[in-house]
Amino acid sequence: MISIPQVSSILCGMVLLLSVSHAVAQAPNDLTRNRTITGDVMRIEYAYYVVKEKNGREVRLHADKTTQMMGQPKQGDHVEAEVTDQNHTLRMRPLP
């Protein structure tokens, strides 16, 4: 016969498994929500790159240690960046 502590341990494990699977399903790096920004680096403000797109719109992109940088973009560089819906930069690379 299964004791009450064993049942509660099993239930806690199931709840933990479900909550982890829910968190994974809503991961911020979900590729379906990412988009690509292409433009010129207008300025760099601490951890933010202000990129001006071809249509004239300026976008402020956040970069941190998790961002995959191909080179070190500087003001005036033409770049392509893959960003999340919150404008966190996942990858940034220079374009010719």
Image (cartoon, rainbow, N blue to C red):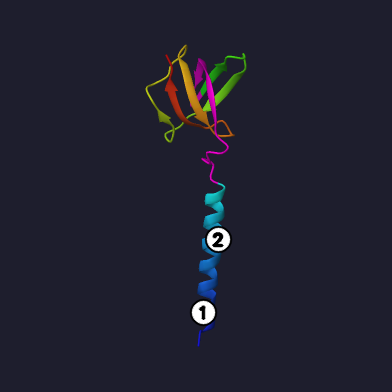
Quarter of the image for residue 28 reads: top right
Q: Is residue 58 left or right of residue 91?
A: right
Q: Which amino acid type is shown beneath numbered disc 2?
A: Leu
**Which residue is at a point 56% across and 54% down the rendered structure image?**
22
Q: Distance between the residues labelled 2 and 1?
A: 20 Å
Q: In this view, does 15 lie to the left or right of 64?
A: right
Q: Which amino acid type is shown beneath numbered disc 1?
A: Pro
Q: Residue 5 carries which label?
A: 1
**Which residue is at a point 53% across and 56% down the rendered structure image?**
21
Q: What element carries label 2?
A: helix
- The region drawn magenta spans 27-48
| Labels 2 and 1: the sequence-earlier one | 1
Q: Where is residue 74 in the image (x, y as percent from the top left)?
A: 43, 16
Q: Which mark's residue is nearer the viewer, 2 or 1? A: 2
29 inside magenta stretch: yes
**Which residue is at a point 47% across and 19% down the rendered structure image?**
79
Q: Position of residue 55 (x, y in %)?
A: 62, 14
Q: Where is residue 61 in the image (x, y as percent from the top left)?
A: 54, 26
Q: Which of 23 and 62 is in front in this view?
A: 23
Tell me how many marks there are.
2
The extreme front residue here reads 32
Q: Residues within 10 Å of mark 1 (few under 14, many from 20)?
A: few
**Which residue is at a point 51% across and 40% down the rendered structure image?**
29
Residue 40 appears in the picture as rendered = yes
Quadrant, the C terminus = top left
Q: In this view, does 21 lie above or below 58?
A: below
- Mark 2 highlights which residue? 18
Q: Is residue 87 above or below residue 16?
A: above
The extreme bottom residue here reads 1
Q: Is mark 1 on a helix, strand or loop?
A: helix
Q: Position of residue 4 (x, y in %)?
A: 54, 82
